[in-house]
Image (tube, helix red, strand yellow):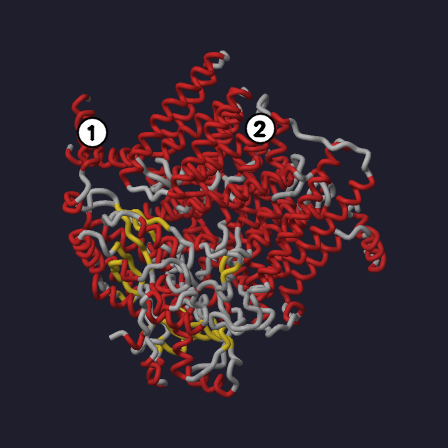
């Protein structure tokens, strides 16, 4: 490891150590509120039976280790004060932000609210398009659009109790959104001569969605997180095929 | 029953099963499905067996067992694929395989790693079966030596041994990671008094965190972020190496295999823990006893062999208390218990009396299953390596979606996804700051066991620590733990030399090449 | 080919619009999902898989059994099913232990939101290790009365049905045991065999193999009748030696499934018919006999009454033990003595 990187690591260690010590202290304080010696749920208590025993033990050890880490890091930073600190590039942090936004947005915004097939397709399409194109401009745009829509979806599920019918319209809106996004991406790709990336992105997203949804829902009988216009039609389809089969 | 009669039952069962084409198709199909189940992040052997249980309701017992055991064996093995190829363990059982499997794949020897895994898994399973047949009464009796005291020491042992899989940076970081895992494991109702700890009045936190979302969060999410952020490619794609059973490498590792499978069987047979931990403990032990521990973690075949032999050997181990006492030795074995009861078989001490051939039939089926796994594995490994040809920017988004679906599928709970994300971000930063992640996951798995059993042990002894040094198994475990701690002391070689001299054992150690 | 596509399209259209009252008449036309609130492989799971498979034959659709464990006493699975439409396509597989969920803060509904079907349960009994010096319940009780709390007892987890049976035994006999909790029946039974505790209270279904195999020695049934056990003999009822137990016991398991109370009446009717037919099948009858389950077959109002009793008993017991978060009366749960 380069000395600059080690310096950056030790500086980060100081921060984590402080956080650790703080969290460990909180853990111990919270544990002290647990029943320490009085009986609970018909189990006679003593110090060694208390639910607080283990958390206090772990909390104290964590506190100790945090203190050791803090000490080591501070000593290192003090004794090597002349060494500069390495920094991650800005572009790398942007990619990190986009990755977190994509995954977190999908989990907190899309999956709980939008039909799983739609959520899966748009997630895969944008994710693959952003990184396979390896184009910082696209990544920046996708970051803004995706973060905004995900936050909107989170707000909707937080503050609005959606009925079956409204969910249907949400799914329709998402379909429109999807079409717009795919079309937008195409025009971007065309300008920078990356049309093949656009093609492979939507194809992969579509194929994976078409394979995964029936596989889980019909093959393994796992109910999907949100079943809206696509998944419900898919399930209906199964019964139509069955009825048709039976009528033969 | 004498051995000859057993053999004839074994042989005739094998023949009957093999002579039916339906059975053969089910065998290969279930084994294949199991491998896929294990390979997809988040889908575990437990979920697979649960799903199959309903489907096998209408079948006769033997056919149902072929399907269930085939899937079980396949799933434990299949978890190693993503471990080796993309550094994301498909199941907790295969997490230790990633430590050396992924570096091997990065060197362009992914095919070799898969080949070794496949054959090591076969040998592990077969050795597990062997012990199941010849020693199950003995092992079952040993399992009954495990009271709360021993369970606590075993959990402590697991935590300590994983502490030896340490950080490349400061040693204290390994401890911190393990302690964070243990701290996280205290979330939820405490198992003794049912008192809610750190649940913040959220019903979703009441049962604590599930292992699968934590596992996916700890390994999957950071790997996706790291690879795409730093524009890394996955394992080397230029050459895959030929996939061979590599009998020679395995023969060289015979001591390793013997030790690892014993560890796997032992841990599998102790009720409550199973293959999740077996791989870790065996890996840690092999590293600790190796003459070149520094090569572990850089693509050491011995490491892969250790963890894969052990996790498959624990299948046989887990079936011992299940079939002889009716106590499942691991989570998938618990599911298997349910499936057997559906078919009117209540596993327990009476099985041997009421249906004397049952154990032999299970053995025959298991042997078939392990060979089906091997055949499927040798065939699949060649194909699976090819996924590395897919660019990371296309492959990893799909993996991410699978992680999301896999974390959701077992508990049908969106809250698990939130936890996965949270753990993922924290694990990513810990990883960046050179904290080892494995101790964290082991802490989460073993924390409740340590907590519950320590307190129950003290409750039973009314606060006395004496039973720890009065019970034979307890003394054994305690001395192993102290020995591990000693090897970590800086002046250990000096003490050891002094001790060896004192006991006059020089010659013994010299002969061994020390 | 065109004909096929046309009929498929028409079919999709038809199934899409067939919501509302019409759908209830055609119930069931799709597969039903049974969400078990305990984890796969346990007693409730096995019973639900059995009964679902048998009911499916009479309903002519599949019943898929999935598990959604977690929360407070199965609260996650119950609230999941309760959030689903009351159309009878999502059932909940449950057992008596879920009734304590509300007072422990798991959710805010009473058991009367369900329309239950009770398959049955296995009676509880008290056993000691085969190596134990005790041969009858009287010896054990006499011994512990001399030295209260000197004998360790296990009975599954705190607040489980077996724990309640242990408490009832202590109340009815005046004996005081030292209760050591275990996370389930299997570890509790193992603890007796390893000698960690002296006695265990779990169900006969869970113990029968160990009794027949000579690992456990049964002392008494905690129900009114004696029990014949092939390969062992007769297990006497504890009520004979301690008639005062009748006031507190029996507390029987109630494993079964339920649909939302506000489901359409003919959906409930169809489920009831299928359930009753399924219970009567030789498969279920034989399975119950082999595994020492006492079949109940209660449905609807009678089953609701049973659950109301269990809910009251569990809730107030938990309250008395100090393990309840919510006072049962706040939820409108009457005391067991107030029930008729």
Q: Mark 2 points at which residue?
A: A94
- Label 2 packing within 10 angstroms: few (<14), some (14-19), many (20+): some
Q: Which numbered circle lies on residue A234?
A: none
At x 47% / y 39%, what residue is drawn?
Answer: B373
At x 60% / y 65%, what residue is drawn?
Answer: B149
- Label 1 packing within 10 angstroms: few (<14), some (14-19), many (20+): many
Q: Name the residue under label 1.
A: C8
Image x and y of residue C320, in percent: 42, 74
Label 2 with label 1: CB-CB less than 8 Å: no
Residue B386, placed above or below residue C197: above
- The answer to whether any part of residue B455 appears in the image is yes
Q: Please state which of residues C131 and B447 is positioned toward the viewer in this rendering.
A: B447
Q: Please state which of residues C17 and C300 is positioned toward the viewer in this rendering.
A: C17
Residue B389, placed above or below residue B345: above
Q: Distance between the residues labelled 2 and 1?
A: 48 Å
Image x and y of residue A106, in percent: 45, 35
Looking at this rendering, what residue extends furthest in the front direction?
A159
Q: Mark 2 lies on which chain?
A: A
Image x and y of residue B178, in percent: 63, 50
Q: Which chain carries label 1?
A: C
Corner quadrant of residue B30: top left
Q: Please state which of residues B70 and C13 is positioned toward the viewer in this rendering.
A: C13
């Amino acid at each position: 490891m380069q000395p600059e990187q080690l310096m950056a690591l030790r500086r980060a260690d100081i921060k984590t150590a402080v956080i650790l010590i703080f969290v460990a202290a909180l853990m111990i304080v919270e544990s002290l509120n647990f029943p320490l010696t009085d009986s609970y749920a018909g189990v006679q208590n003593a110090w060694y039976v208390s639910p607080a025993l283990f958390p206090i033990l772990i909390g104290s050890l964590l506190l100790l280790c945090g203190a050791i880490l803090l000490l080591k890091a501070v000593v290192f930073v003090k004794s090597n004060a002349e060494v500069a600190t390495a920094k991650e590039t800005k572009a790398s942090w942007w990619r990190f932000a986009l990755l977190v936004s994509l995954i977190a947005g999908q989990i907190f915004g899309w999956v709980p609210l939008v039909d799983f097939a739609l959520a899966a397709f748009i997630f895969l399409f944008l994710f693959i398009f952003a990184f396979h194109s390896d184009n910082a401009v696209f990544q920046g745009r996708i970051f803004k659009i995706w973060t905004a829509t995900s936050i909107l979806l989170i707000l909707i599920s937080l503050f609005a109790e959606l009925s079956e019918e409204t969910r249907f319209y949400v799914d329709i809106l998402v379909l429109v959104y999807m079409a717009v996004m795919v079309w937008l991406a195409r025009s971007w790709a065309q300008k920078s001569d990356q049309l093949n990336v656009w093609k492979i992105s939507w194809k992969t997203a579509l194929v994976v969605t078409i394979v995964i949804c029936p596989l889980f829902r019909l093959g393994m009988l796992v109910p999907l997180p949100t079943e809206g216009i696509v998944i419900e039609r898919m399930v209906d389809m199964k019964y139509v095929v069955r009825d048709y089969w039976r009528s033969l | 029953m004498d051995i000859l009669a057993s053999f004839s039952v074994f042989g005739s069962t094998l023949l009957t099963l093999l002579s039916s084409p339906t059975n053969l198709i089910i065998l290969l199909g279930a084994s294949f499905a199991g491998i896929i189940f294990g390979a997809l992040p988040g889908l575990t052997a437990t979920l697979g067996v649960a799903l199959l249980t309903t489907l096998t309701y209408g079948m006769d017992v033997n056919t149902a067992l072929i399907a269930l055991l085939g899937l079980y064996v396949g799933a434990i093995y299949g978890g190693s694929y993503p471990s080796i190829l993309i550094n994301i363990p498909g199941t907790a059982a295969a997490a230790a395989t990633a430590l050396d499997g992924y570096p091997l794949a990065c060197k362009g020897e992914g095919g070799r790693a898969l080949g070794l895994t496949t054959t090591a898994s076969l040998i592990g399973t077969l050795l597990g079966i062997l012990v199941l047949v010849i020693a199950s009464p003995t092992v079952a009796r040993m399992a009954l030596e495990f009271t709360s005291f021993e369970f606590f020491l075993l959990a402590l042992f697991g935590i300590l041994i994983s502490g030896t899989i340490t950080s490349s940076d400061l040693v204290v970081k390994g401890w911190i990671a393990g302690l964070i895992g243990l701290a996280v494991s205290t979330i939820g109702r405490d198992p003794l008094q049912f008192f809610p700890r750190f649940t913040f009045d959220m019903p979703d936190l009441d049962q604590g965190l599930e292992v699968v979302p934590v596992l996916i969060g700890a390994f999957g999410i950071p790997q996706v972020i790291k690879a795409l952020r730093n524009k890394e490619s996955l394992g080397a794609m230029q050459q895959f190496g030929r996939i061979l059973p590599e009998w020679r490498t395995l023969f060289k590792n015979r001591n390793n295999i013997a030790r690892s499978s014993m560890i796997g069987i032992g841990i599998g047979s102790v009720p409550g823990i199973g293959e999740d931990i077996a791989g870790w403990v065996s890996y840690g032990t092999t590293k600790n006893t190796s003459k070149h521990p520094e090569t572990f973690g850089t693509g050491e075949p011995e490491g892969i062999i250790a963890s894969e032999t052990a996790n498959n050997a624990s299948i046989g181990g887990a079936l011992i208390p299940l079939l002889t006492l009716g106590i499942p030795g691991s989570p998938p074995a618990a599911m298997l218990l349910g499936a057997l009861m559906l078919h009117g078989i209540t596993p327990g001490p009476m099985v041997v009396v009421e249906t004397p051939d049952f154990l032999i039939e299970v053995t025959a089926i298991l042997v078939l299953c392990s060979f089906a796994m091997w055949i499927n594995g040798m065939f699949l490994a060649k194909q699976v390596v090819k996924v590395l040809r897919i660019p990371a920017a296309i492959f990893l988004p799909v993996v991410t979606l699978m992680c999301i679906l896999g974390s959701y599928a077992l508990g049908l709970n969106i809250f698990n996804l939130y936890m996965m994300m949270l753990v993922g971000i924290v694990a990513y930063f810990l990883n960046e700051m050179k904290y080892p992640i494995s101790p964290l996951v082991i802490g989460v798995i073993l924390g409740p066991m340590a907590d519950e059993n320590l307190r129950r042990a003290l409750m039973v002894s009314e606060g006395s620590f004496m039973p720890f040094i009065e019970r034979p198994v307890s003394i054994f475990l305690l001395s192993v733990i102290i020995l591990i701690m000693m090897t970590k002391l800086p002046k250990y070689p000096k003490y050891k030399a002094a001790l060896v001299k004192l006991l006059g054992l020089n010659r013994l150690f010299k002969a061994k090449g020390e | 080919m065109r004909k096929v596509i046309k009929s498929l399209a028409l079919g999709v259209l038809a199934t899409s619009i067939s919501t509302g009252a019409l759908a209830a008449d055609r119930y069931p036309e799709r597969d039903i999902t049974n969400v078990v609130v305990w984890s796969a492989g346990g007693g409730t799971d096995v019973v639900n898989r059995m009964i679902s498979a048998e009911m499916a034959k009479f309903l002519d659709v599949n019943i898929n059994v999935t598990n959604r464990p977690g929360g407070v006493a199965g609260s996650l699975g119950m609230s999941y099913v309760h959030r689903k439409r009351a159309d009878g396509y999502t059932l909940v597989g449950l057992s008596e232990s879920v009734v304590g969920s509300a007072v422990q803060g798991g959710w805010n509904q009473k058991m009367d939101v369900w329309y239950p079907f009770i398959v049955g349960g296995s009676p509880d009994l008290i056993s000691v290790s085969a190596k134990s010096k005790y041969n009858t319940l009287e010896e054990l009780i006499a011994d512990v009365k001399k030295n209260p709390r000197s004998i360790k007892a296990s009975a599954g987890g705190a607040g489980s049905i077996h724990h309640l049976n242990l408490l009832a035994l202590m109340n009815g006999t005046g004996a005081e045991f030292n209760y050591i909790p275990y996370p389930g029946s299997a570890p509790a039974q193992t603890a007796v065999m390893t000698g960690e505790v002296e006695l265990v209270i779990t169900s006969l279904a869970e113990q029968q193999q160990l009794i027949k195999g000579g690992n456990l020695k049964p002392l008494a049934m905690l129900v009114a009748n004696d029990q014949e056990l092939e390969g062992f003999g007769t297990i006497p009822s504890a009520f004979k030696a301690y008639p005062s137990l009748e006031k507190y016991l029996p507390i029987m398991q109630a494993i079964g499934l339920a649909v939302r109370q506000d489901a359409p009446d003919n959906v409930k009717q169809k489920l009831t018919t299928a359930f009753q037919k399924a219970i009567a099948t030789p498969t279920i009858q034989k399975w119950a006999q082999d595994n020492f389950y006492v079949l109940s077959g209660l449905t609807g109002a009678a089953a609701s009454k049973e659950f109301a009793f269990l809910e009251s008993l569990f809730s107030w017991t938990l309250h008395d033990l100090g393990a309840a978060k919510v006072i049962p009366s706040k939820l409108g749960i009457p005391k067991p003595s107030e029930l008729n």
